[in-house]
Image (cartoon, helix red, strand yellow):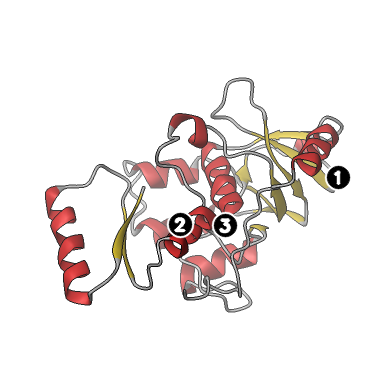
Amino acid sequence: MIKPHGAEQLMPLYVEDAAQRAALLKEAETLPKLLVSSAAAANAVMLGGGYFTPLTGFMNLADSLSVATDLKTASGVFFPVPVVNLVKDVSSIAGAKRIALLDPNVEGNPVIAIQDVAAIETVSQEQLELMAKEIFGTLDPKHPGVSTFLGLGNQMISGPIQVLNFSYFEKDFPETFRTAVQIRKEIAERGWNKVVAFQTRNPMHRAHEELCRMAMNDLKTDGILIHM
């Protein structure tokens, strides 16, 4: 099996060890709390599952701008979109070096991750619009991605994270949610060497299904991975 992007092996940020996870949740009770955006919570889930290997957490401003304009981090690692934790107000975590991130998508706002605060940077409106334009190809406020991104806030909190749960994904989608680690493990267990993969946000159209089958037949692969 080919190596994960940018690393020798997957780098999931979810804390697997139950005792360590319990200790971190206990620590979180004493840390400054920050209710993150739905986008940041989803990014935490992806970081936890190993999908964003080789990232160790949320990007800083230099990396975010570099990724948006050149598709590479400041150190030269290819990455397609900025992975950021943007908020409007950082007064609740002023001066903190370690914070608990609260999940906005689950009732009661449980702690989804703990973040080491490497930096808190103010992003100018010009920089926000530059990133939005590069990411979405437009600044039309009617575009849902643009309006959401520009509404997150201008305070960027960067630094590594330790993920403590997968938000609502495991509960709401038990039959389909898989981490990158689980997917690669199943591919190996099936003995597949070559795989056609299709990633979709929506239910597949028949045309999508046929394209996957055509690719499987033309490339003589062992199977098809449909990634939700």
Estimate how packed mark 2 is, as few (under 14), some (14 to 19) or many (20 or more) residues with alpha carbons within 10 Å: few
Q: Where is mark 1, residue-wise?
A: 95
Residue type, numbered disc 3: Gly
Could you give the CA–CA distance between mark 2 and mark 1, rounded to whole angstroms? 44 Å
Residue type, numbered disc 2: Glu
Earlier residue among tags 3 and 2: 3
Q: Is residue 144 left or right of residue 73?
A: left
Q: Residue at x 52, y 75 (%)?
A: 3
Residue nearer the viewer, 26 or 192: 192
**Residue 170, above or below 163:** above
Residue 210: percent from the left, percent from the top? 13, 58
Which circle, 3 or 2, is nearer the viewer?
Answer: 2
Q: Where is mark 3, residue-wise?
A: 50
Estimate how packed mark 3 is, as few (under 14), some (14 to 19) or many (20 or more) residues with alpha carbons within 10 Å: many
Q: Are circles 3 and 2 on residues that touch, CB within 8 Å?
A: no
Estimate how packed mark 1 is, as few (under 14), some (14 to 19) or many (20 or more) residues with alpha carbons within 10 Å: few
Q: Where is mark 2, residue-wise?
A: 186
